[in-house]
Amino acid sequence: MFSHAEEVAHYLEVRRRRRRIGAVAYFILLVGYLAWRVTVLNPHAMAYSALFLLADIHGALLGVYYVWQSWSVRVRPAPPADFRPTVDVLLPVYTEPLEMIELTVQGAVSIDYPHETWLLDDGKRDELKALAEKYGIRYVRRPVNQGAKAGNLNHALKLSTAQAVAVFDADHIPKRESLDMLVGHLKDPTVAVSQTPQMFYNEDAFVYRDVVTGGGRWHEQLFFMDVVQSHRDQFDSSSCVGTGCVYSRAALDDIGGFPEATLTEDLHSALLFHKRGWKTVWVDEPAAWGVAVADVSEFYKTRRRWTYGNMQGFALEKLLWCRGLSWRQRAGYLAMMADMLGGWMQLIYLCVPVISMIFVVTPFEPGLMNMVIFVCYPALLIAAVTSATGGFLRFLPGQVFSMGRLFLQLECTRGLLGKKMAWQTSLKNVLGRVSWARLSMHVVLLVLSGVAILFCVLRLLGLWGMHDPMVGGPAMLALAAFWVLLNCWRSWRWISDSIRLTRRTHREYLFEAELPILDESGAWLGHTRRLSTIQAEVVWKKRPEAGQRLRILIPGHRVSVVVKDATGEIMEMECLDASSFDLLRRSLYSVDWHRMVRLSRHMHATQEKGLGGEWQPCIVQGQFWGLWLPAPEGHENDRIMLAGGFSIGEVIEIETAEGRTRRVIMEGIRPHRPVPRGLNDTWVHFYKMKFAQSA
């Protein structure tokens, strides 16, 4: 229905004036702030003042990076269709769940572009060998696990003779059109890799927040994936992200295969490509749907591996002085490194106000005007950056995540020493669990901050000697207390969000899809709001009994289920047979039709076509799934979304929860992009409708 990349570009474009004003304001404010900042160092605590100034400079440079990367983005046109090299699809797996791997295998086998699928089993599991035989794909088990994922891929490269290789992680289910989106870009012989963003289907995950930005819900990596990478693509210099990509075999051979010296073969390989003069292509469209981390424990594992591995790669490739990089490429990588070193800046901002309250010492010359500036200027700079980035950087969630990354960024600085960290396996689960071990340091921060505030209150009440030889001691203590309270709020939100967002997850992800539910006679019982293969959140018209058999209409098919429990909004259910289970699973996991429908009311392209709004589930001709959209704003006729084609002029009967009506199919509507077929091989069509005359 809509292009993700085009929606991101449109989102930024309609905010262009605001972003430009924000960018200019940021640089003006920044110059003024830093010029003033160096004049107010406290001569009585120079080292303390200089440390605080260093943190301010680091934050200022990060702001420059954010503004620069947000200035403009590139939307790649469709790749040439006349370039058809041979492709092997590589699926490296280790200890991931068998059910998850099978979904990925199903997606890979169903890719439209001619290819051979390889299952690279580093876990040495016989059940995976059986899975490969079931789907008729090539199974590879190497004798020794060396080099982690990169080593697994390199072992397959020795066996593969294809001109290009595609890589999908075990938890990333490829879309049917994924290779058609990517392979054509390799027609340029200087392109090493064609890469897409990591996009996730489980949007109740720990990293998501319930606000739509650009082409989807806001998440912690959104700015990097949609803005930074699209900006760097203007200079053919985007990074690899390890999955949903197609590599040129010639480029891989040129750098000696996937680098095994670091934990992040993706960014390391991109750095090697750029040093050797190769280009990288960024296609900001979903090529696969993966699993986002569900809880704080998995967040720490993945971010620790990314941060440590990237630092390690920067060190090994001597980023500061190596040859082969353009100034834009070097600046982009240096900015990434500076962002990953942000934990030290956060540590200084945590410690300075606490030290100030306990020892009554300021990191700048005390005075009312200086204190006002220290409060106002940072707030103005933050507002300017938020405006310049078009809302892709959000202040409050960003502050919470920066607090959450604090300790892992401090730890991962060791990666600059070039030493390799042991590989940590992620669980790849969608059901989150609260890990107090991961939250304990933030609890300690809250306790220490509380002690510091107690000291402050005692001093302000005169119950603890001020011992302050400088003017403005009480005002300075109040200012320090304000910053400590802000840091307390950040730690508290990190802890509370880690608990709250983890508890909203389920055994299986509940997709936001509205599907009619019928009894065995075909009567309307209700419709789903969200569902998985074992549960559904339902709006009931008539609640069924436990043990009752129902039919759920999905695009192009009907699946049979039996009710296990339906006492509340959540219905526990079980598919009656393997065929129903497979159809339901393929309909939910393989495509993003349900995501497109849910987001349509926010998307520019769908609104232009009159396809944006609150779609309602319906039954067509008594047996087919459909979604009905009453005449959207600016358009006269109703719309209907159907799996399968109908004839123009055909009269159809539509049933919703409110009753039945008869409509005439007027004409078809071609969306900006067709809804993908998915694993069930079902095309979705859109039509305009009008009332049918009574017989």
Image (cartoon, grey):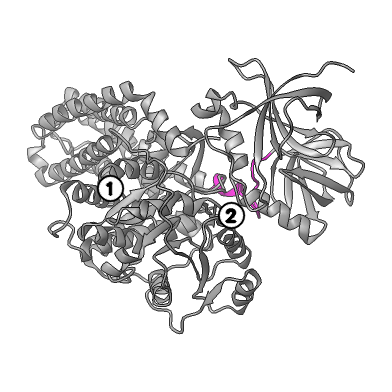
Disc ID at residue 430: 2
Query: Start and end of the magenta stretch?
Result: 499-513
Is residue 218 at all visible to an observer of this figure?
yes
Residue type of the residue flagged with mark 1: Asp
Q: Is residue 440 left or right of residue 250?
A: right
Q: Nearer the viewer, residue 425 or 452?
A: 425
> Which quarter of the picture shows residue 360?
top left
Place of residue 466 in the rendered image (x, y in percent of width and height, measured from the top left): 22, 36
Q: Residue furthest bottom?
A: 143
* Residue drawn at the location 39% of the way across and 35% of the way down: 392
Q: Position of residue 378 (x, y in %)?
A: 26, 30
Secondary structure mostly taken by the magenta-highlighted segment of the chain: loop
Q: Mark 2 belongs to which amino acid?
A: Val
Q: Find the residue positioned furthest to the right.
A: 521
Point out residue 77 in the picture as x, y percentages from the top left corner. 39, 40
User: Residue 488: in sight, yes or no?
Assistant: no
Secondary structure type for disc 2: loop
On screen, residue 491 above or below 273: above
- Assess disc 1: are there few (<14), some (14-19) or many (≥20) residues with their C-alpha within 10 Å of its C-alpha: some
- 354 w.r.t. 607: above or below: below
Could you say whether the residue bearing mark 1 is in a helix, strand or loop? loop
Front residue of 18/438: it is: 18
User: What residue sits right under mark 1 in the picture?
Assistant: 236
Magenta-drawn stretch contains 504: yes
Q: Give me the residue at 56% from left, 48% from top.
A: 201
Q: Position of residue 577 (x, y in %)?
A: 81, 59
